[in-house]
Image (cartoon, grey):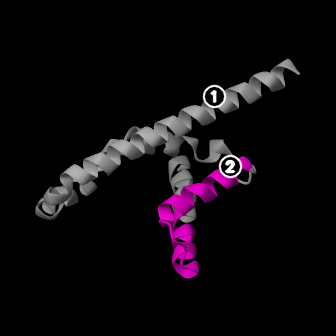
């Protein structure tokens, strides 16, 4: 029953976020908005990590399986995507490199701030 409650919490936040995105005409996916809302709720301790941790860990462990329908959809539309293959690979490569660089910079910045805080 514990898992059901945890799953209901996560799904409820996602459903409310989807409705908000549609109602407010926000220019981002409801799932992304929902994860942001969940993060804020966790940071402000409105929802405790323990109240969703087990189901969250489970969902992360099966994450690759959740991509299978997307992969099948891509294969079904391969004839449309094939002419765009080279540009898509280029865009994916460039955006991945940019993401890695920005993430690395932010992590180094946070580590430096943490070290200064510990030394003070």
> Which region is colored magenta?
14-43
Compared with 105, 91 (above or below) is below
The answer to whether the residue labelled 1 contacts the one labelled 2, judged by CB atoms less than 8 Å apart, is no
- Place of residue 106 in the rendered image (x, y in percent of width and height, measured from the top left): 62, 36
Nearer-the-camera pick, 24 or 48: 24
Chief secondary structure of the magenta span?
A: helix
Q: Residue at x 40, y 38 (%)?
A: 61
Q: Residue at x 26, y 47 (%)?
A: 89
Would you name the residue on which mark 1 appears?
A: 108
Does residue 58 appear anywhere in the picture? no
Does residue 117 appear anywhere in the picture? yes
- Place of residue 90 in the rendered image (x, y in percent of width and height, measured from the top left): 29, 47
Dividing the picture into quadrants, the one containing residue 59 is top left
Dividing the picture into quadrants, the one containing residue 33 is bottom right
| Disc sitting over residue 82 in the figure | none
Measured in 3D between alpha carbons, the distance from the residue under mark 1 to the one under mark 2, in whole angstroms, is 24 Å
Location of the C terminus (image quadrant): top right
Left or right: residue 86 versus residue 90 is left
Nearer-the-camera pick, 13 or 1: 13
Q: Could you tell which of marks 1 and 2 lies nearer the N-terminus?
A: 2
Q: Is residue 113 magenta?
A: no
- Place of residue 41 in the rendered image (x, y in percent of width and height, measured from the top left): 69, 54
- Place of residue 34 in the rendered image (x, y in percent of width and height, measured from the top left): 55, 61
Compared with 110, 20 (above or below) is below
Judged from this view, the residue extending furthest toward the left is: 79
Q: Residue at x 68, y 26 (%)?
A: 111
Label 1 secondary element: helix
Would you name the residue on which mark 2 appears?
A: 42
């Amino acid at each position: 029953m514990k898992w059901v409650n945890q799953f209901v919490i996560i799904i409820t936040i996602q459903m409310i976020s989807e409705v908000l995105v549609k109602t407010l005409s926000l220019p981002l996916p409801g799932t992304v908005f929902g994860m942001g809302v969940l993060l804020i709720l966790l940071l402000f301790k409105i929802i405790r990590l323990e109240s969703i941790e087990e189901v969250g860990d489970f969902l992360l462990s099966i994450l690759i399986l959740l991509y299978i329908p997307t992969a099948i959809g891509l294969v079904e539309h391969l004839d449309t995507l094939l002419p765009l293959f080279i540009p898509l690979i280029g865009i994916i490569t460039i955006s991945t490199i940019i993401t890695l660089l920005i993430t690395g910079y932010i992590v180094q910045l946070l580590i430096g701030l943490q070290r200064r805080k510990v030394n003070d």
